[in-house]
Image (cartoon, rainbow, N blue to C red):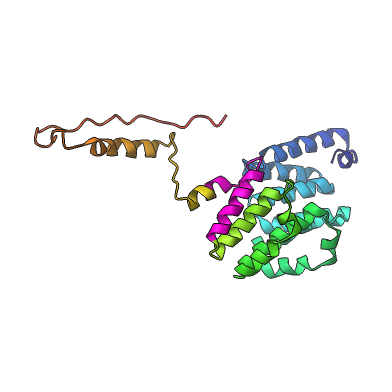
Amino acid sequence: MRQELMSLPKTLADDVARNLVMVAKLLDDEPEQAYAYSRVALRLASRVAAVREAAGFASYATGKYAEALAEFRAARRMTGSVELWPVMADCERGMGRPERALAMAGEPEVQKLDRAGQVEMRLVVAGARRDMGQAEAAVVTLQSSELASTSVQPWTARLRYAYADALLAVGREDEAREWFAKALEADQGGTTDASDRLAELDGVEFTDAFDPEAADEGAEEAPAQQGGADQPDQSEQGGQPDRPERGDQSPPDED
């Protein structure tokens, strides 16, 4: 990316770079803000492939799939690279055209993808199958040497998670639970919610201790739960049970 920006005047290159840094920084947690920065970078340097690619991912993260596809196509024309092929196919899914995603999976570009790209394409195809109501086909699509491998790669957690989700969709709950557990084992960066899915399958419910509404509900229910055979009936004594006061219980800063 730095090499591409060297084609611009230095001051302009610095401005574009700052916007691209903000896109990368905000993309996961604040996608709308990342999108805004990407539009600035695009306005400043639309002929730079890295800028078009960044704009594509920002659009993709905010669900603007038509925009994302247009940017990815532009970046691909500029570079000739096939690495964006899987996400381009997923944009077709996002636009409600899973059959086009499947058609892209049969194109020669797929054979030029590296191993990570092949796995991404498999995930997209499985998603397209499910979009089309072909749940069993989605399960079969995800069965691969990468899924069977015991080594942990950057894509392992997501692949195992997708397989578990596909198994659950066809009613194979026991197997799904096993694969959610395997996904959690491989998920070093917390990229999936495998732990939540496992808890859901096990019937475990979590209460957010910092949720004001949950705290208020618990406070209101507490007197009823504490009542017993040895405690006097408050209504007979003409009084009201003590209730904890409701305060402003704002959640702590995420930092």
In the shown orientation, is residue 247 left or right of residue 169? left
The C terminus lies in quadrant: top right
* Image position of 104 with respect to 151: above or below: below
Asked if residue 48 is among those painted magenta in the image, a careful observer would answer: no
x then y, percent, for residue 181? 59, 49
Left-right relation of 151 to 181: right
User: Which image quarter is the N terminus in?
Assistant: top right
In the image, is residue 113 above or below residue 58?
A: below
Residues in magenta?
A: 173-197
Tell me the quarter of the picture where residue 73 sits. Answer: bottom right
Q: Residue 215 appears at what percent x and percent y?
A: 37, 36
Count of marks, rendered view: 0
Left or right of 51, for residue 7: right
Main SS of residues in magenta? helix
- Asked whether the viewer can see residue 70, the reply is no
Residue at left 79%, top 38%? Answer: 16
Q: Magenta includes 188?
A: yes
At which x and y percent is residue 231?
Answer: 16, 33
Residue at the location (62% across, 40% down)? 29
Viewer-closest of 39 and 221: 221
Residues 39 and 62: in front is 62
Q: Quadrant of residue 239?
A: top left
Q: In the rendering, at what x and y percent does residue 237 appear?
A: 9, 32
Name which residue lies at 24% across and 39% down. 224
Observer able to see residue 175: yes
Relative to residue 142, is residue 181 drawn left or right? Answer: left
Find residue 144 and report its image quarter: bottom right
